Image (cartoon, grey):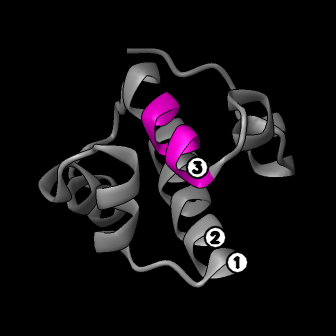
Amino acid sequence: MLDAGTAVKNRVIELCRERGLSLNRLGMISGVSQSTINNIVSGRNRSTTVTTVKKLCDGLGITLGEFFSTKEFDALEQELI
């Protein structure tokens, strides 16, 4: 089962590929630290904050709605802790 952390990771990677951006460049244009981005894409950070996603979106020039508007996010089931 896909979880939210994996969906965020996959979306960040997908958006960078679409735009020809390195993860380092994404960090520079979004103001998110390289270590935070590395933790997201490596799967070490499985609970990225909305604030961080918003910064990434700002750097990518998209809205939060556009970030989360994918079949992958639509298919997520409730995660019980």
Secondary structure state at the residue bearing disc 2: helix
Please provide percent x and percent y for residue 56.
Answer: 47, 44
Secondary structure state at the residue bearing disc 1: helix
In the image, which residues are magenta? 53-60
In magenta segment, residue 16 = no
Secondary structure state at the residue bearing disc 3: helix
Please provide percent x and percent y for residue 32.
Answer: 27, 44
Q: In screen coordinates, is 61 left or right of 26? A: right
Q: Which residue is mark 2?
A: 14
Q: CA distance from mark 2 to mark 1?
A: 6 Å
Q: Residue at x 53, y 59 (%)?
A: 12
Q: Residue at x 40, y 21 (%)?
A: 51
Which quarter of the picture shows residue 19? bottom right
* Label 2 Cα crowd, 10 Å radius (few <14 / some 14-19 / many 20+): few
Which quarter of the picture shows residue 75? top right
In magenta segment, residue 56 = yes
Amino acid at dot 3: Ala
Q: Earlier in the sequence, mark 3 or mark 1?
A: 3
Q: Contact (CB < 8 A) between labels 3 and 1?
A: no
Please provide percent x and percent y for residue 40.
Answer: 32, 53
